[in-house]
Image (cartoon, rainbow, N blue to C red):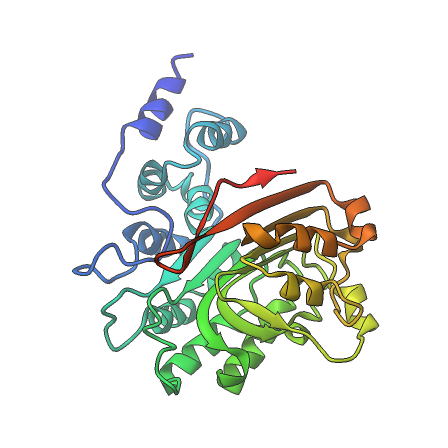
């Protein structure tokens, strides 16, 4: 029992004030990447093969970290910096979910360009990331009519990497697919075909469903806030066999939009759909539910509905409490 004291002290006594596991700038005066990420990347350059010298077995030490420190990125960062034995395990926890986001007053080189440069310098990071968020939160990048060449190159670099463990990709880019540079479209299409990719979420991006036709392992599709997919005018049964999500999230949606997604022309195969979440104005919710095909109702396990109520004065919608049916 006494041998657990040094490890316990190391796990709980090395608290540093740092940001968690994302790459978002901490504030307007500190626009660099989160300190924990840069430290983890720096330590990741060392080899994984390190002799175990801690007084506890490896599996027990990892169990303590997973049980008590899974969300304590401050302590995990400290462990990665102070114990060579725990560095490989802790760096995976620090780098498994990354968020690259803009700020309102962005400097000339965007976070996307800095992130692309980091990936070139430290390619081993690619093997550790399981969730990646690319967030143009204030439209500082895509607001201009033309993409800068540096930004185009950066996006191409990011999305053409071999993300062997990437499970979820979240894109917040307010733009139309046709207006994006061809190099960026091709890079995104390549990213959508990653064999490890299971979840896709879009905010603000309007893209054709054909861009997702080769996402054969996709389990979750989320179309959020001003994002949408355009459908072919003719039936495409071949695509329907490939794109069969088990979870579909539409926030918000209208009866017309949903009717398109479940129509005969839609390449979406909803026979495997298990979980469906959507937002819609409360006065048309029945119309959306009536549009659900019978075959979808048989497979569905959960249905969550958020009702949008319109403010008559402001002419805006706000979300009421979600209901699970």
Tell me what residue is drawn at x 72 percent, y 78 percent.
232
Tell me what residue is drawn at x 44 percent, y 72 percent.
174
- Percent position of residue 156, x then y: 48, 78
Q: Quick check: 8 above or below 49? A: above
Left/right of residue 271 with respect to residue 36 in the rendered view: right
The total number of labels drawn is 0
Tell me what residue is drawn at x 32 percent, y 52 percent.
39
- Comparing 63 with 171, the one in front is 171
- Comparing 178 with 308, the one in front is 308
For residue 197, which quarter of the picture?
Answer: bottom right
Q: Quick check: 241 above or below 5? A: below
- Percent position of residue 267, x then y: 75, 69
Q: Can residue 47 be spotted in the picture?
A: no
Q: Can residue 243 be spotted in the picture?
A: yes
- Residue found at the far left of this picture: 29
For residue 242, which quarter of the picture?
Answer: bottom right
Query: Looking at the figure, which quarter contains the N terminus?
Result: top left
Left/right of residue 138 with respect to residue 44 in the rendered view: left
- Residue found at the far top of this picture: 1
For residue 146, which quarter of the picture?
Answer: bottom left
Left/right of residue 69 with respect to residue 294 in the rendered view: left
- Percent position of residue 172, x then y: 45, 65
Query: Looking at the figure, which quarter contains the C terminus?
Result: top right
Q: Quick check: 114 above or below 54? A: below
């Amino acid at each position: 029992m006494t041998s657990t004291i040094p490890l316990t002290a190391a796990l709980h006594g090395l608290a540093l004030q740092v940001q968690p596991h994302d790459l978002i700038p901490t504030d307007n005066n500190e626009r660099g990447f989160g300190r924990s990420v840069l430290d983890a990347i720096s330590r990741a350059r060392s080899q994984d093969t390190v002799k175990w010298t801690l007084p506890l077995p490896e599996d027990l030490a990892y169990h303590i970290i997973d049980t008590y420190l899974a969300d304590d990125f401050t302590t995990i960062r400290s462990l990665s910096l102070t114990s060579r034995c725990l560095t490989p395990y802790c760096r995976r926890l620090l780098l498994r979910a990354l968020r690259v986001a803009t700020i309102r007053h962005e400097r000339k080189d965007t976070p996307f360009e800095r992130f692309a440069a980091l990936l070139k310098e430290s390619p081993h990071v690619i093997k550790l990331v399981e969730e990646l968020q690319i967030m143009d939160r204030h439209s500082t990048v895509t607001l201009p009519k033309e993409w800068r060449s540096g930004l185009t190159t950066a996006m191409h670099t990011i999305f053409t990497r071999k993300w062997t463990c990437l499970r979820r990709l979240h894109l917040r880019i307010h733009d139309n697919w046709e207006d994006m540079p061809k190099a960026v479209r091709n890079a995104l299409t390549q990213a959508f075909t990653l064999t490890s990719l299971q979840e896709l979420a879009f905010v603000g991006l309007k893209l054709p469903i054909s861009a997702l036709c080769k996402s054969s392992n996709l389990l979750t599709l989320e179309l959020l806030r001003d994002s949408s997919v355009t459908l072919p005018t003719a039936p495409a049964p071949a695509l329907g066999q490939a794109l069969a999500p088990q979870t579909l999230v539409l926030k918000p949606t209208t009866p017309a939009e949903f009717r398109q997604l479940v129509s005969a022309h839609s390449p979406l195969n909803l026979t495997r759909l298990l979980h469906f979440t959507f937002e819609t104005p409360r006065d048309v919710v029945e119309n959306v539910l009536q549009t659900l095909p019978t075959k979808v109702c048989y497979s569905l396990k959960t249905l969550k509905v958020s009702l949008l109520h319109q403010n008559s004065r402001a002419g805006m919608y706000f979300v009421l409490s979600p209901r699970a049916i």
